[in-house]
Image (cartoon, rainbow, N blue to C red):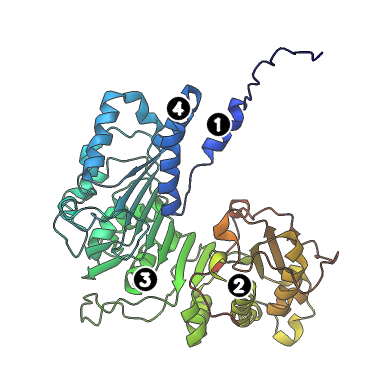
Amino acid sequence: MDVVHPPLPPTHRHIPVDVCENIIDHLHSDSDITEQVDCVRALRRCALVCEEWRVRSQMRLFYCVVLHDAEALQTFAAVLDTAPHLRDYVHEVTLVGRTLHTTASSLSPLPIVLYGKLPRLEKLWIRRVDEEETWYTRASQSETGKPLPYLPLHPCFPLCLSAFTTVTRLSVSLVTFQHFRDLVKMAISLPQLQDLLCDNVRCLILGPLPACIRPQSNKTRASDLSRSAPNLQFLDTDMHCVNRFISAYGPRLRRFSISLPFFQDYMMDVPEDPITELAVGIDLSPCPTLDFLRILVNSEFVRDGRTAMLQAMLESWKAEVSLQIVYLVARAEDRLHRQQFTRLLSIIGLVLEKWLLDGTDTPSSVAAQNSEHDVRRRVSVGIHDRQVWRDWWWKRLEECFPTFARFDALQMDYATPQGNHSKWKNHDASPSMPPTNSYWGGRASEAKPMNVCDYPCLHFLWIVDVHEVQPP
């Protein structure tokens, strides 16, 4: 006779709330706008799961707000009026879309619509979506407004923007200004600005040097400008504009990023004036306190062999500290094979080896006999890869920077990849040489990225490859 057992009670599988909240907190991207848009969509879905998820998801949704058009801006302002407690949640605002260069742009009305409603705003990101980009939803013609060749800004825009006294970072990408002075006024209108990023920024008219950044006519204002934005990043931005910012911020500039080869916008209207700065390249001589120099090197720079421009910039970088560190890292591993990046390092290494010897206090024939304490310049390379490749990378770095290795001035900062964007194209391949327990000279860190804030007195050079190089 079969024994009939009573049915078992249903099993409730419960995931701890703190685990769910930790997962929700990771739905955020600081650098990739496509990932950030995807994170916002995911957070909206998480907010519909349950009450516990709703609270955390809502907090993350309002931490970084993404606005796609003027209608979204008005809706966001209405939400803040209805629920004032949400104002303290907002730390970042991103304007993204195809309407920024139209009469329906959301940037010009932003400081008026959100006046007094963002007491904790820290970052403002302006990112125009190009017509060729397919990842972004294409709006209907009636929603885009009349197209314009530049970003429409009201004359009072800088004055209204100055009300955001808590903003410390301004990022502008794929945007065209009518005049160079419009870009300058936007930057100096934020009184607490600490970081300015211009990525693929154009100016239709260079014009004369704005009075607000002319030291000889307004020394007090130039000093205020230097204190408000000590960190500058210019990627694919015309070198005339870059040199103007360097001359204004230079005396107290501490961190600076630039892409190579230096970009020259031939469509920009440059005044034919012998006083106007027309030098080719970047001059860092006005930056005696610069302690972070980041350079993004693309494949074009390697192919045309214009290493003289890099040499000239390094020679103009006159440090007033006893130690300089060159920090090299690939920020576009997903576009490169490992061998391609090592080939880039070997070309750049020739320039840096000469820079190292130029920085020694003794002739090059005697410098090799010096100890590491006599070397004023060092190289550190950041690598994201699997542990099985660690010894392979160290061997390649010793080949690219033999003099630094001989001086014991070469360091590898090794870490595992964080996401697909930091994985090499041949990520799944195995190294040709087996891993060994080689000696690292005490200079290979344990899968922990170097924190530049731990070295306030050092100089850094960060060289990155962006565009793809043909496979060997």
Looking at the rendering, in which quadrant would you find the N terminus?
A: top right
Residue 21 bears which disc, if any? 1
Residue 368 bears which disc, if any? none
* Crowding at mark 2 (Cα within 10 Å: few <14, some 14-19, many 20+): some
Is 183 in front, or is 437?
Answer: 437
Give yes or no for contact between labels 1 and 4 (Cβ–Cβ under 8 Å): no
Secondary element at image label 4: helix
Q: Which residue carries the number 3 mark?
A: 243
Residue 54 bears which disc, if any? 4
Q: Which residue carries the number 2 mark?
A: 337
Q: Earlier in the sequence, mark 4 or mark 2?
A: 4
Q: Looking at the picture, which amino acid does disc 3 mark?
A: Asn
> How far, Cα to Cα, is label 1 from label 4?
10 Å
Is 193 in front, or is 223?
Answer: 193
State which mark lies toward you, 1 or 3.
1
Q: Percent position (x, y) of residue 319? A: 55, 68
